């Protein structure tokens, strides 16, 4: 068994303690917010990891991370510590659910051929209708029959909609490579103006000093270890650790601050 | 709803062999999605399956030897698809069970098993069709 790159075991135990305490508190306890913020911070790397699975090259990664974070918050609030289940296992489908819904609601964010785009509209309507009728998601043959096309066409349209390019892991910068030239890492900088929706994290990420931002991207988007990042950037691992902690602190503050978008969404739950 | 040719996929086996290179993983994803459609999995199941196949490959590829292939064996049945992915390894390879890939795989697949057979490391995942929700 290879050793962990990150202290996951400790983090999981820590998360378990936080969740147990959170769910034992009365609804109006001010401590809830503190705990929830800590849990969000602890699990943001999971959100980023999952969001990355859906990011095409021109995809505004921050949007995906933002909707994923909403899923994370829902999972934190709904988790039942009494059940013998790892929180990250519980949270993964919830986070993915939010990301998938985001794609369904805003399919136009992805550049797909026009034919597939039109098919998408038809497909989405059929999908919604059939889900309602069947009480579950439809199968590919069911969808094909409903909109009167063959199954390949349905699969193709589903592909186009998801833009599942699956991030090519090998281009995520070997140590020493010029990381900022990577197209995926570039999207964070270029995506700002394209996004209509107000992103919670976008502002904070944009405001981060360049060194912090780069290191956070390497840590959570490229999923590098602190030691690897130290090698790439050419600073000590301690320096990396400090910059990651400082960057995360800012992100946490932004999520915890009375930011209108987040607060509105939270209240619904 | 019947399958198009009225045929049942029960027991059918499909095998795909690709270079142990991340560039080919998309081929496995597509194959998995296509076969899952034949098994009458729902489109939500298929989305989960594609991600799960991705994660299984991500867990295996770091252990593949330079000349290894990535072999996938799909076993089809009505409402269920099993996917065995494997690579050639050096001694004592184990998938990393501490990272996100393992967590996500476990959360998305209906079951996950790891097998070691000599210098071959295999991850078998299954996806069964979701039940209708209330």
Image (tube, grey):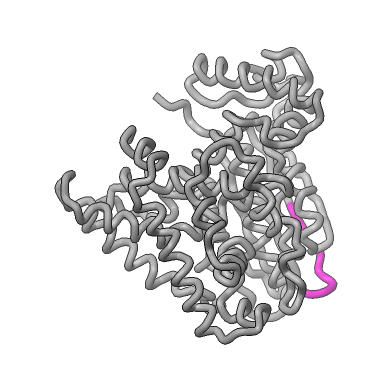
Q: Is residue B32 above or below residue A224?
A: above
Foreground pick, A164 / A105? A105
Q: Indicate yes or no whether the magenta region holds residue A5.
A: no
Foreground pick, A201 / B79? A201
At 51% across and 75% down in the image, what residue appears?
A4
At 63% across and 51% down in the image, what residue appears?
A53
Foreground pick, A194 / A179? A194
Q: Is residue B95 above or below residue A105?
A: below
Foreground pick, A212 / A35? A212
In the rendered image, residue A234, in percent from the top left (x then y), is placed at 65, 84
Where does the N terminus of chain B fall, quadrant-wise? top right
Q: How many numbered callouts?
A: 0
Horizontal relation, residue A67 to residue B29: left or right: left
At 79% across and 28% down in the image, what residue appears?
A152
Q: Quadrant of residue B43?
A: top right
Q: Is residue A101 above or below residue A146?
A: below
Q: Is residue B34 above or below residue A39?
A: above
Horizontal relation, residue A166 to residue A92: left or right: right
Is residue A68 among what the camera can see? yes
Numbered range of the magenta stretch: B65-72
Is residue B79 among what the camera can see? no
In the rendered image, residue B87, in percent from the top left (x then y), is placed at 73, 66
In the rendered image, residue A36, in percent from the top left (x then y), is placed at 31, 54
At 79% across and 64% down in the image, what residue appears?
B20
Where does the C terminus of chain B fall, quadrant-wise? top left
Q: Indicate yes or no whether the magenta region holds residue B71.
A: yes
In the rendered image, residue A215, in percent from the top left (x then y), is placed at 58, 70
């Amino acid at each position: 068994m290879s050793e962990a790159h990150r202290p996951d075991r400790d983090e999981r135990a820590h998360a378990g303690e936080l969740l147990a305490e959170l769910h034992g508190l009365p609804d109006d306890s001010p401590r809830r917010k503190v705990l929830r913020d800590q849990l969000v911070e602890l699990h943001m790397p999971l959100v980023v990891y999952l969001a990355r699975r859906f990011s095409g090259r021109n995809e505004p990664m921050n949007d995906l991370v933002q909707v994923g974070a909403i899923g994370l918050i829902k999972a934190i609030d709904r988790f039942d510590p009494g059940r013998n289940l790892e929180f990250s296992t519980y949270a993964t489908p919830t986070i993915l659910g939010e990301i998938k819904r985001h794609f369904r609601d805003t399919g136009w964010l992805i550049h797909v051929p026009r034919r597939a785009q039109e098919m998408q509209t038809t497909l989405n309507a059929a999908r919604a209708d059939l889900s309602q009728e069947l009480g579950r998601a439809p199968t590919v043959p069911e969808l094909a029959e409903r909109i009167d096309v063959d199954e390949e066409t349905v699969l193709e349209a589903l592909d186009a909609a998801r833009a599942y390019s699956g991030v090519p892991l090998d281009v995520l910068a070997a140590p020493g490579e010029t990381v900022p030239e990577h197209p995926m890492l570039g999207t964070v900088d270029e995506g700002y103006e394209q996004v209509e929706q107000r992103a919670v994290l976008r502002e904070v990420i944009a405001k981060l000093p360049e060194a912090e931002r780069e290191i956070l991207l390497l840590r959570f988007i490229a999923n590098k270890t602190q030691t690897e990042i130290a090698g790439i950037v050419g600073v000590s691992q301690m320096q990396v650790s400090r910059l990651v902690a400082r960057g995360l602190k800012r992100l946490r503050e932004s999520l915890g601050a009375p930011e209108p978008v987040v607060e509105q969404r939270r209240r619904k739950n | 709803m019947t399958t198009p040719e009225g045929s049942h996929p029960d027991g059918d086996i499909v095998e795909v062999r690709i270079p142990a290179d991340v560039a080919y993983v998309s081929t496995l994803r597509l194959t998995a999605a296509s076969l899952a459609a034949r098994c009458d999995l729902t489109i939500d199941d298929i989305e989960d399956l594609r991600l799960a196949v991705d994660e299984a490959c991500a867990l295996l590829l770091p252990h593949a030897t330079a000349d290894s292939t990535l072999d996938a064996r799909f076993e089809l049945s009505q409402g269920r698809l099993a996917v065995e992915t494997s690579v050639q390894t050096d001694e004592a390879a184990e998938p990393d069970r501490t990272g996100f890939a393992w967590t996500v795989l476990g959360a998305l697949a209906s079951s996950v098993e790891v097998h070691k057979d000599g210098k071959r490391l295999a991850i078998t995942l299954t996806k069964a069709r979701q039940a209708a929700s209330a």
